[in-house]
């Protein structure tokens, strides 16, 4: 997915965990999308005051909606995209030559490194179909962000059964079980199905964690969590006790607090305004850095074209420390 905001602002993402302890609820922002796509996107990361959870730096939940996805080639840098469909099938093409179907329960992780471009289209063409899914971005640390791009698909993710729940380990490590996906910092990303009843999740106390309910409801620290907001759990928890009356499905995200300041704009994660400006100019100029996505271009009919970069905001911003 691309960030389809017509006038995205730069997001300053200072390093480190959010200061306050205890459970915090961060409401989703409904992001107005450009163009004719009528898909509802709820964004829970980044937020002012909560820019990252570990290296997780962006979280969009789209659908469920009867729509046709048509996202033309667009660039990324400095991040990994994690596409986790919950309903529907999407075809992913990228500048590495990948041309694959993206299906529920399968992990698609694209490492942008210094530059990649990709497209995402409904497999059934312009006919609307039920689509729902999550798109996450993981910020790449300094030593990994200049690497060559790569794309991985994992169709056989490990499952873990625990106290009142079952978990699919999508990214990183949960309860000692590791996902096969390549990552570059200490992370967890898991989809859990629980209850009804009590749940006791093992957590890494060196991580900060967040929880996003997808279906049903869950009580944590005396608060009822329902689909919509992102619950931030802070650092230092070695377990999480929760309860659900009718069952719940939720995402657990976590990681070691990210120690590098970030500047995020549009589809780019960098360290300075100048770096973002250069990437934008190179995409607009068709530079080799972002490659070409096969299957698009003059003869591709509905798939002709690419997404132009929006204008850079007038205000020049620099990353700040989280306070
Ligand atoms: Mn994208």
Image (cartoon, helix red, strand yellow):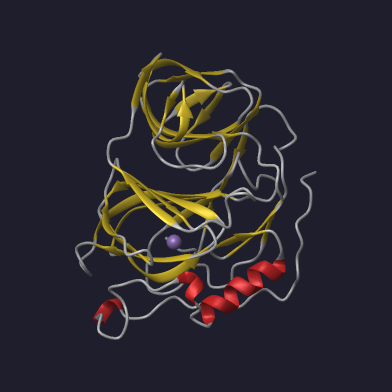
- Residue 284 vs residue 9: left or right? left
Q: Position of residue 26 (x, y in %)?
A: 60, 42
Q: From the viewer's perspective, is residue 59 above or below residue 284?
A: above
Q: Position of residue 80 (x, y in %)?
A: 49, 52
Q: Quadrant of the N terminus?
A: bottom left
Q: From the viewer's perspective, is residue 103 above or below residue 206?
A: below
- Residue 118 vs residue 315: left or right? left
- Residue 156 vs residue 4: left or right? left
Taking the spot 37% from the left edge, 20% from the top edge, the residue there is 165
Closer to us: 192 or 213: 192
Taking the image in four quarters, ligand 1 sits in the one at bottom left
Quadrant for residue 295, please give it. Answer: bottom left
Taking the spot 66% from the left edge, 37% from the top edge, the residue there is 257
Q: Position of residue 140 (x, y in %)?
A: 58, 50
Q: Quadrant of the C terminus?
A: top right
Does the image show residue 33?
Answer: no
Q: Position of residue 155 (x, y in %)?
A: 27, 41
Q: From the viewer's perspective, is residue 186 above or below residue 124?
A: above
């Amino acid at each position: 997915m691309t960030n389809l905001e017509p006038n995205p602002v730069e997001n300053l993402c200072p390093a480190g965990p959010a200061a306050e302890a205890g459970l915090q609820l961060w409401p989703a922002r409904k992001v107005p999308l450009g163009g004719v796509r009528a898909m509802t996107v709820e964004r829970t990361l980044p937020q002012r005051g909560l820019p990252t959870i570990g290296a997780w730096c962006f979280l969009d939940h789209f659908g469920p909606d009867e729509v046709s996805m048509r996202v033309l080639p667009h660039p990324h840098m400095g991040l990994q995209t994690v596409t986790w469909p919950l309903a529907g099938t999407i075809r992913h093409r990228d500048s590495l030559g990948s041309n694959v179907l993206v299906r529920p329960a399968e992990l698609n992780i694209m490492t942008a490194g210094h530059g990649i471009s990709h497209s995402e289209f409904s497999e059934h063409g312009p006919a609307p179909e039920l689509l729902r899914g999550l798109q996450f971005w993981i910020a790449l640390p300094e030593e990994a962000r200049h690497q060559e791009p790569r794309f991985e698909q994992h169709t056989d993710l490990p499952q873990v059964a625990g106290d009142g729940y079952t978990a699919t380990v999508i990214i990183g490590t949960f309860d000692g079980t590791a996902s096969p996906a390549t990552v570059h910092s200490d992370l967890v990303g898991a989809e859990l199905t629980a209850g009804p009843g009590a749940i006791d999740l093992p957590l890494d106390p060196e991580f900060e964690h967040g929880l996003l309910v997808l279906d049903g409801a869950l009580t944590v620290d005396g608060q009822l969590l329902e689909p919509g907001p992102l619950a931030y759990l802070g650092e230092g928890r070695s377990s999480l006790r929760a309860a659900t009356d009718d069952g719940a499905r939720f995402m657990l995200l976590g990681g070691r607090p990210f120690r590098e300041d970030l500047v995020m704009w549009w589809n780019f994660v960098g360290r300075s305004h100048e770096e973002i400006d250069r990437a934008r100019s190179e995409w607009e100029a068709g530079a080799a850095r972002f490659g070409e996505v096969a299957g698009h271009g003059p003869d591709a009919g509905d798939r002709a074209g690419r997404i132009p970069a929006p204008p850079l905001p007038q205000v020049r911003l620099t990353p700040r420390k989280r306070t």
